Structures are given as C-alpha cells and as structure tokens.
Image: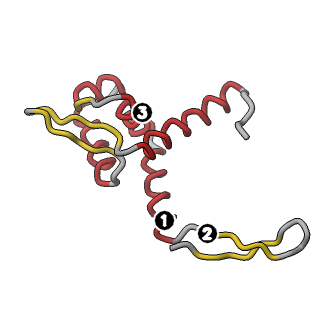
Amino acid sequence: MRSRADDVDSDGRAAHLDLPSADQIEVAVHALSLLADPTRLRLLWLCATAEHDVGRLAVLAGTTPAAASQHLAKLRLAGLVSVRHHGRRHLYSTRGGHVARLVREALSYADHQLSGAPPHP
C-alpha cells in the first residue's frame, strides 16, 4: 500500500504524490544493500547473463567457492537469485527480470559516471 504526501507544484498548489509503502522501502533498501558489496554485484551480474554453478561463479568473480556460496545464500534468501538443481550441480541465476535490470542499470550508471557520458532523460 502506498501512502500519500502533499508537495507544492511550481504554481504553489498542493500536488499529491504516491509514496512507496514502508514495506516497499524496507525491501528495496535491503536489496540495494546487498548490491553494495562488490563480490555480490559481480555474482549478480554473472547470474544475469546465464546460469552458473558455484565453482564457475567463484572463478569468474575472483573469489573462493566458499565465499561465493555464502554470498549466494544471502542473495537467495533475499529473493535476488534462484537455484536450479541439475544432478549434483546447483545452477544460479537472477530471479526475474527486475533483478537483472537493476544490476544492468546500476552498472550502466557507473559506466556513464566513469566515461562522462550524459545521463539518459
């Protein structure tokens, strides 16, 4: 449920804004805090490109399988990655398009900041 807030528009009239609910803010903040870790962001980017097992993710992300596994467990608990069992292998991927787009947008933003490219409208 969204809450309402009053704001003032350029003519001095009250404008109503639909604010996200406290629960939505809490979930978003938790997801973004998980993305704030460089290893987890690398893992999410890799999981957004294809399914990978822990060993491959560890090598590609430049970490150990134990560390990758711990990070993936946190991401899974937060609903950011899903796991599919294929025999004895556990294959990880981002959970839905929202997560993949969030990761791509964060990295696109970083690319624009580093390259000096103008922001998108």
* Residue at x-position 47% and y-position 65%: 26
Q: Are marks 3 and 1 in contact (CB under 8 Å)?
A: no
99 relative position to 50: left or right = right
Mark 3: amino acid: Trp
* Residue at x-position 28% and y-position 44%: 82
Determine whether the residue tagged by mark 1 lies in a helix, strand or loop.
helix
Asked which quadrant contains residue 68, the reply is: top left
Determine whether the residue tagged by mark 3 lies in a helix, strand or loop.
helix
What is the spatial separation of the Cα atoms under label 1 and label 2, in whole angstroms? 10 Å
* Residue at x-position 22% and y-position 27%: 55
Residue under circle 3? Answer: 45
Asked which quadrant contains residue 113, the reply is: top right
User: In the drawing, what numbered circle is on residue 19?
Assistant: 2
User: Sequence-wise, which precedes: disc 3 or disc 1?
Assistant: 1
Q: Provide residue 52's location: percent of width, then percent of height.
A: 27, 29
22 relative position to 91: left or right = right
27 relative position to 67: left or right = right
* Residue at x-position 45% and y-position 37%: 38
Badge 1: residue crowd in 10 Å (few <14, some 14–19, many ≥20): few
Q: Is 28 situated above or below 118?
A: below
Mark 2: amino acid: Leu
Foreground tag (3 vs 2): 2
User: Sequence-wise, which precedes: disc 1 or disc 2?
Assistant: 2
User: Sequence-wise, which precedes: disc 3 or disc 2?
Assistant: 2
Q: Are marks 3 and 2 in contact (CB under 8 Å)?
A: no
Residue under circle 1? Answer: 24
Q: Provide residue 51's location: percent of width, then percent of height.
A: 28, 31
Residue at the extreme left of the image, as rendered: 87
